[in-house]
Amino acid sequence: MTYIQNPSSIEETSFKIIQSIIDEEHPDYQFQTEMEESIIKRAIHTSGDFDYLYTLKFTHDVNQKIVEVLKNKGTLVLDSSISLNGINKRVLDQMGVNYTCLINDEDVALLAKEKGITRAMAAVEVAAKIPGPKVYAFGGAPTALSYLLELVEAGQMEVDAVIGVPVGFINVEESKSDLLASPLPAIATLGRKGGSTIVVAIINAIIYQLKEVLTGDYIRYSTPTSK
């Protein structure tokens, strides 16, 4: 057996296989934009699950809004250390983009205890105080996602965009349905599937699509375009 050992070649070959499966098993499928194609394919690459062709949804020009936040050196607010560890921080650092997960922050712990809410919910409140534009990403905290929607509806915080792909069985489908029905620019999955690795896939797909960063370097975009 001949092994492919170069990581770039492995990834490139994987995306070619993904496209070939789409051509064979979903011949009538059409991606709406190059950005959506990149996001959906990377979610499939991460999970091996072609359901994301149909369950990943995009509202209110969300991809462009996220790009604007990144270009304006905003902040990515993540709900788990798994997502924080997985995103391409080297590229984000080049762009001057901030990123944080506040789940273990002392102020968050104090607020959660004071209000009798979860740390993930408290993290939403604390993150709202971060200056500048923000994108909130949820891969494992549906209650925090619902809490964010409540705060936005009450006029207590502003949100530029939301990635809402929590996985699980309790309040997961409801929170994502509410997000998709809201006026917020959003990327969300239908059903129970999702998770922190899907958050990582979405964010990395977007930053790989931004070909030019502030230093003038170019980001490799490995996902081949569809035929």
Image (cartoon, rainbow, N blue to C red):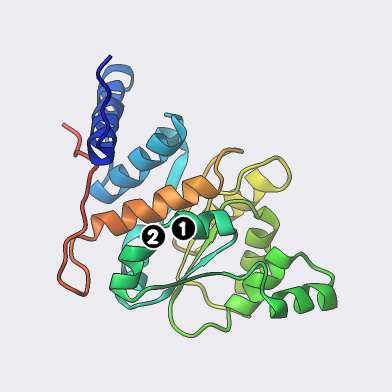
Res 154 seen here: no
How many marks the image carries: the answer is 2
Q: With respect to residue 148, does 96 lie above or below? A: below
Residue shown at 46% from the left, 34% from the top? 47
What residue is pinned by disc 2? 62
Label 2 close to label 1 by CB (< 8 Å): yes
Q: What's the amino acid at mark 2? A: Val
Q: With respect to residue 140, does 108 lie above or below? A: below
Label 2 crowding class (10 Å Cα cut-off): few <14, some 14-19, many 20+?
some
Q: Is residue 115 left or right of residue 225?
A: right
Q: With respect to residue 167, does 84 lie above or below? A: below
Q: Where in the figure is residue 162, as x and y percent of width and height? A: 49, 62
Q: What's the amino acid at mark 1? A: Ala
Res. 93 image quadrant: bottom left
Q: Where in the figure is residue 169, as x and y percent of width and height? A: 71, 40
Q: Nearer the viewer, residue 142 or 48?
A: 48
Residue 198 numbered mark, or none:
none
Residue shown at 68% from the left, 64% from the top? 120
Q: Where in the figure is residue 51, as x and y percent of width and height? A: 46, 30
What residue is pinned by disc 1? 186
Res. 114 image quadrant: bottom right
Outermost residue, top direction? 1
Residue shown at 63% from the left, 71% from the top? 124
Q: With respect to residue 6, does 126 lie above or below? A: below
* Secondary structure of the residue carrying numbered label 2: helix
